Image: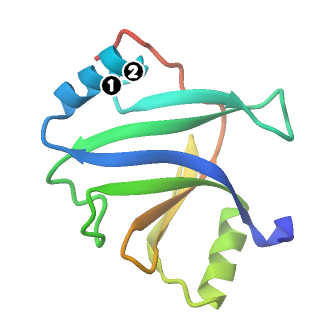
Amino acid sequence: MPEKLGKVTGLGGVFVKSNNTKSLVAWYREKLGFPFDGYGSSFLFRENEEPNKLGYNVWGPFKHDTTYFEPSQKDFMINLRVEGLESLLARLKAEGVEQIGEVEKHDYGHFAWIIDPEGTKIELWEQIGEPPIVDNKAL
């Protein structure tokens, strides 16, 4: 697929609903060694085509009553890393994929959302800037 059309470059993260986020974070931190930055766990890596550039993946718990995953009724949401978010959205629209909400632009990335054929909300994320500093002791 030509890069000018936008593309998915990998998994950006997994987000799950939780009945007790503090307890779940503690379990993942204690049993699996997940770092926690106050929002989720960020895992650093080097970009394949630009080894000097750092990227990151995120695991994050949300309160069980969050509306962030809507309109999906699932207890999880996946986040995909992308390059060329606007181009990708234009191509997906032309192919009949509906965008949910508006593109959000933050200093750490640009975000958009779609729903797959089975109702799973997919967050599309184009990383901007460097990864956050991860504090393994924060809770």
Residue 66: horizontal and vertical position, in percent? 20, 54
Residue at image point 73% right, 64% down: 7
* Front one among 23 and 110: 23
Query: Could you tell me the amino acid type at mark 1?
Result: Tyr
> Where on the picture, by quarter, is residue 33?
top left
| Quarter that holds the N terminus | bottom right
* Front one among 71 and 27: 27
The residue labelled by disc 2 is: 32
Query: Could you tell me the amino acid type at mark 2?
Result: Leu
**Residue contact between numbered discs 2 and 1, judged by CB atoms under 8 Å:** yes
| Quarter that holds the C terminus | top left
In the picture provided, is 120 more to the left or to the right than 97? left
In the picture provided, is 111 more to the left or to the right than 54? left
> Where on the picture, by quarter, is residue 120?
bottom left
Residue 79: horizontal and vertical position, in percent? 50, 53
Secondary structure state at the residue bearing disc 2: helix
Count of all numbered marks drawn on residues in the image:
2
